Amino acid sequence: MTYTSVFSEYQSFLSELSSKNIESNYGLGYLSYALNSSDPFIFNSAVCFMIIVFTYVMSLIPFGKNWTRSSSYVDKFWAVAPSFFAAVYVVYLNSSTNDLFGSRTFYVSLLIIVWGARLTFHLYRRGFYALDYEDYRYTHLRTKINNPIIWELLNLFFISIFQVILNVSLTFPVNLLYASDKTSPSALTVLDFLFFIYLSIVVIAEAVSDQQQWDYQTEKHLYLKKKKSSSSSQPIKIEPKYEVGFNHTGLFRYSRHPNFFCDQLFWLSVAIYSIVIGKWSLPSASYDYIIGSLVMIYIFVRSTNLTERLSASKYPKYAEYQKKTSKVIPWFSEKVSYKFD
């Protein structure tokens, strides 16, 4: 174990493999060796490979009432996998220390697990875990990509391989905390606890924004259902708040995507904190542990742009909302008009 960089971790493991007399068995021998590694970083990487295979194979099999394929199996792991990877570091550290609750690995991993548990619940109630569920962005991409070969390549390399690797890379920085707690343990300071409190606030803010979105969409659909079933003799009261079609109140008055902002801030904060701690105890530690959070921000930017285009084409008032409200970073904004011609 080198801990100095992501690259050196894999380089060290490959060198170790070449020095061992391991039967390949179509790669299963190497996978088994990685799963039995004393390095949690390598163990998590092996699990990552297994998730890639699982999500891709499942995306090829039709399920559900309509007997259709879905490429959203990656999304089903998006909240669960980081929690698992973080928990692995805690388990490994617990086997080599008598002060688990005095470690930075424990508290950051705990917050990642809380982040994952909350997001898992949110995705569950939205139906993400139904076998035939597929994210609307993938459905939209299917309509734009008519060549089945190109779609299958996209499904394999971007959706299954790239996104799962990105998912595990978000927890790479925890490896630095694990290394620090294992090789150069030091007492937690006030600054550490302030960071834990700050990270908790970010998780709470993301939970609030998701709940506000859930409440708005639930109430909107109930309103539209009542409106559809009402008669001219017994009309319901028109609610401009729901007629506009999208949430623009609460945290969504200050950012069009406050949940996206909190998600990116959470992982970027974890990476920066871990690198600072890692550099303190391991001066040779590399900055490449931040790559996961930076790539995620880039993907979020591209994904948010797609979401914005779809929303603007669906809701006439969304253009006004775009002009008056910050896209991602929360900022003061003007109130969106409810008036309809």
Image (tube, rainbow, N blue to C red):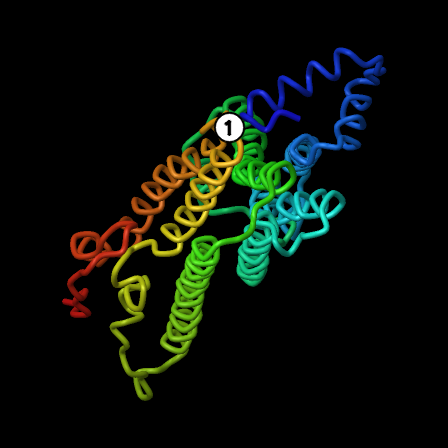
- Left or right: residue 252 compared with residue 91: left
| Quarter of the figure with residue 178 | top right
**Residue 12: x %, y % from top left:** 66, 19
Question: Residue 149 versus residue 105: which sits nearer the camera?
Answer: 105
How many discs mark residues in the rendered view? 1
Residue 142, compared with residue 334, is above or below; it is above
Question: Residue 200 versus residue 194: which sits nearer the camera?
Answer: 194
Residue 17, compared with residue 59, is above or below; it is above
Q: Residue at x 72, y 42 (%)?
A: 92
**Residue 10: x %, y % from top left:** 62, 21
Question: Residue 329 versus residue 42: which sits nearer the camera?
Answer: 42
| Quarter of the figure with residue 174 | top right
Q: Which amino acid, by three-letter code, is at mark 1?
A: Ala
Q: Which residue is drawn at 31% across and 53% down?
A: 314
Residue at the spot of label 1:
285
Q: Residue at x 58, y 27 (%)?
A: 156
